[in-house]
Amino acid sequence: MKTAAPLFLLFLCVSAVKAQQQPPGPPGVAANVEITFRVNMNTQIGLGRFNPDVDFPVVRGTINGWGCSDAMLESEDEEGVYELRVQVFNHVIGAGEYKFNINCGEGGLGRWEDAISNRRYTVTGTEPDDNGDGFGELVLDTVFFDDAVGGADAELFFQVNMNVQMDSGRFNPASDQVFVRGSLNGWGCSDPLRDEDEDGVYELYVQVPGHQAGTGQFKFNINCEDGGWEDSISNRRYNLTGNEPDTNGDGFLEVEVPVVFFDDIRSGPDVEIHFRVDMTAAVEQDIFIPENMTVHVGGVFNRWSCSVEFEEFDENVFELELRIPSHPAGVGEYKFNISCDEFSWEPEIVNRTYIVSNDLPDEDGDGFLELSPPLAFYNVLENPFLDAELVFQVDMSVMEREGLFDPVADNVVVRGEFNGWGCTESMTALGAGLYETSVEAPGLSLGRGQYKFNIGCLDVGWEDSISNRQFFVLGDEVDSDGDGLVEVRVGPVYFDNREPPSGVGPFVRGDCGQAGNMDISSGIFLLGFLFTGGSDPVCLAACDADGDGRLDITTAVFIFNFLFLGGAQPSAPFPGCGLSESAGDLELGCAESTGCG
């Protein structure tokens, strides 16, 4: 918001600026620069993740289109420290991004720095050219690969709430187990987690000698099976700083990972489902004898066990109203059964489906939302196949920002059961990183289908941190465009479940005029906005140089004090671009951040 101030304060600020020596501005919009990159690989060597005899680090970033630089060479002065000088013609003035990478992504140990965001540096155009070769020299600080400064013996405490999975039938405490799999154990399986107090929360302590400091990734998994992953979320993360306590004195630093719901699925609404099934065909085939046989239903809501007995309300038509507390929202699956016989689960059809949502009616006001699937015919689907058009959407924006997808050179496709895990045509860009493709699928079976997105139709292009995705064909889809194919819409989802980081931005704190950095023009732009009717900032949070959540005269004074009088440095994000989750920045907002590209 704008804050009024006496004009003499504006005069004093401008006078103070004029009284100071002006810093030299950049000579243009680009400059020739020689950047020295340095990375310490000693932690990776100690953990067995980098072999100096066969492995090599490279630099990948905006300087080379996220390709690979020449191999970095070990410093003559510091063992385990690698460096590389890269000359860049006409580097834009402003920020550049990069990461280090082992073996350019090739080989068994080839990998990115995957525990950190992109690294940043800033070219000002005023870098010195000490050797007179026409390139200003920018020497970056030495960093540890993946910011892992060392290792420590760690004891990780994992906790997962399985109550929803138990209620939905995906997890049976009597026969199933839950494990943790991640970077801590090479994505193998831990010992099973235990629920000692039988509250549905499973727990496990895992000791990891020599755990790398930094971020670890993991997921929970049922029965240590490929189909048991938490498949709707990205890899979970925890952090080991090396400063954690060792309260029991066993030599292992203790890291308590917060309790989560399996697959991040929390309880849904209380639902009353009215099931109805016509058994006439089963009677005629002598499969069902009403006088001495019973009808039941089983599904995700009761772990595929038998419900109570149905009652006949019309000739050979049976019904049951089943109350299900805390039913997860989304698609539920079920089948009918004769006399609780394991061979009588409607063997000729795929699982039936229904959808639970929070906007179902509660017409009798008993607190249970009412749901009535259509009358079913035992072991028969009236229309088991649909002529369908699958419409897939995927958001590649995060992959683009991380340099893992080039919208100019790369393409993304869909591969799944519907096309024999082959490749669709390249998906079409809709803008803002969103891609779409439509696939005609005549005779598509009702039920669930599996698929994944893939870059370049290559074996290395899969979404590799998630299990196969699933879509459902319910049978009630519509043909909105009249082409004879009902539309089954799938997505949009983020590729590999890589979601954008939370917070406002990115921006550079103090960069009010969106020049890419905070300089004298930032303060002048802010003063013009506050007092002389100047242009509105497109990123108000960036203007808040002192980070107090307000834009006023003291904000401008803060900028000039920092630039010319040795005042306090702005808080993050500064001096490079970044995101902010502070309450003040979130309230101010950042509609556009041209200074960060």
Image (cartoon, rainbow, N blue to C red):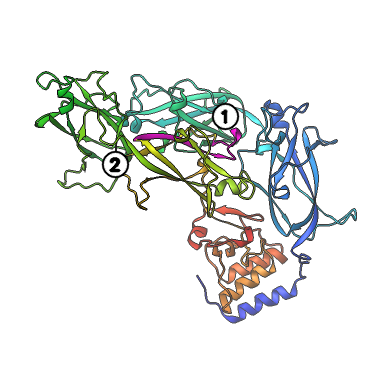
Q: Which residues are magenta?
A: 446-463
Q: Is residue 287 left or right of residue 388?
A: left
What is the quadrant of residue 269 in the picture? top left
| Residue 201 x %, y % | 38, 29
Q: Residue extending furthest right? A: 132
Assess whether residue 166 is covered by the magenta stretch.
Answer: no
Q: Is residue 54 left or right of residue 252?
A: right
Front in this rendered view, residue 10 or 379: 379
> Does residue 260 appear in the picture of this structure?
no
The residue at the point 59 percent across, 65 percent down is 543
Assess whether residue 452 is covered by the magenta stretch.
Answer: yes
| Residue 567 x %, y % | 68, 62
Residue of label 1:
183
> Does residue 171 appear in the picture of this structure?
yes
- Do tag 2 and tag 1 residues touch (Cβ < 8 Å)? no
Quarter of the rendering occupied by the C terminus? bottom right
How many C-alpha atoms fall within 10 Å of the one at disc 2: few (<14), some, or many (≥20)? Answer: many
How many C-alpha atoms fall within 10 Å of the one at disc 1: few (<14), some, or many (≥20)? Answer: some
The residue at the point 61 percent across, 77 percent down is 9
| Residue 437 x %, y % | 48, 47
Residue 585 to residue 278: above or below: below
Q: Secondary structure at mark 2?
A: strand
Amino acid type of the residue that numbered disc 2 sits on in the rendered structure: Val
The Cα–Cα distance between marks 2 and 1, rounded to whole angstroms, is 36 Å
Q: Secondary structure at mark 1?
A: helix
Amino acid type of the residue that numbered disc 1 sits on in the rendered structure: Ser
Q: Earlier in the sequence, mark 2 or mark 1?
A: 1
The residue at the point 47 percent across, 35 percent down is 419
Q: Is residue 130 left or right of residue 582?
A: right
Task: Name the disc covering residue 356, or none.
Answer: 2
